[in-house]
Image (cartoon, rainbow, N blue to C red):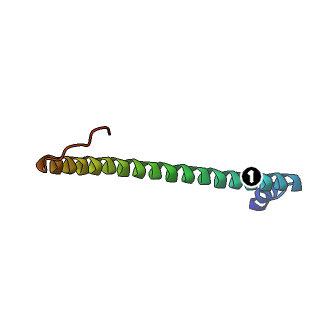
Amino acid sequence: MFSEILSSYDDLDSDIIKNYSEFSLASLLFYGMKEGACSEQSSRMTAMDSASKNAGKQSELCLVKSRVRLSSMKNCNYKEPEGL
């Protein structure tokens, strides 16, 4: 009885096997391309997030530096040259 069931699945044409192998290869290639695209997008998002955070810190540092510079000018009685 078991051999009769197995023989029905064993009767595959070469066209079916060829079509399945082509489909399997195409699916594998598509999966690889999709993973590559998703990985690239994720890397770009991470890089942009880091750049945004660094730019925010940079602007804060520039404000602090500017305030220190202005306070030192006020203490020294520094006057801006005219015409600038």
User: Could you tell me residue 81's position as x and y percent?
Assistant: 26, 43
Across and down, in percent, residue 82 comes to 27, 39
Q: What element carries label 1?
A: helix
Q: In this view, does 72 lie to the left or right of 45?
A: left
Pick whichever, 50 or 32, lies toward us.
50
Residue 23 vs residue 53, the one in the foreground? 53
Furthest residue in direction bottom, as rendered: 3
Residue lying at 82% horizontally and 56% vertically, measured from the top left? 17
Q: Residue visible at 20% across and 46% down?
A: 70
Residue 23 vertical placement versus 80 (above, below):
below
- Disc tally is 1
Picture coordinates of residue 26, whole percent (x, y): 74, 52
Q: Please, which residue is most extreme toward the left here?
A: 75
Q: Is residue 36 left or right of residue 4?
A: left
Residue at the spot x=76%, y=51% of the render?
23
Q: Is 60 or 31 nearer to us in this picture? A: 60
Q: Residue furthest top?
A: 83
In this figure, which residue is indicated by the disc labeled 1? 26
Tell me which residue sits at (55%, 54%) in the image: 39
- Using residue 31 as the reference point, say whether residue 12 is left or right of it: right
Three-letter residue code for mark 1: Ala
Image position of 5 with respect to 66: above or below = below
Indicate the quadrant containing the N terminus: top left, top right, bottom left or bottom right. Answer: bottom right
Q: Quadrant of the C terminus?
A: top left
Front-most of residues 57 and 75: 75
Give coordinates of residue 77: x percent, y percent.
13, 47
Residue farthest right in this picture: 14
Dot 1, crowdedness within 10 Å: few (<14), some or many (≥20)? few
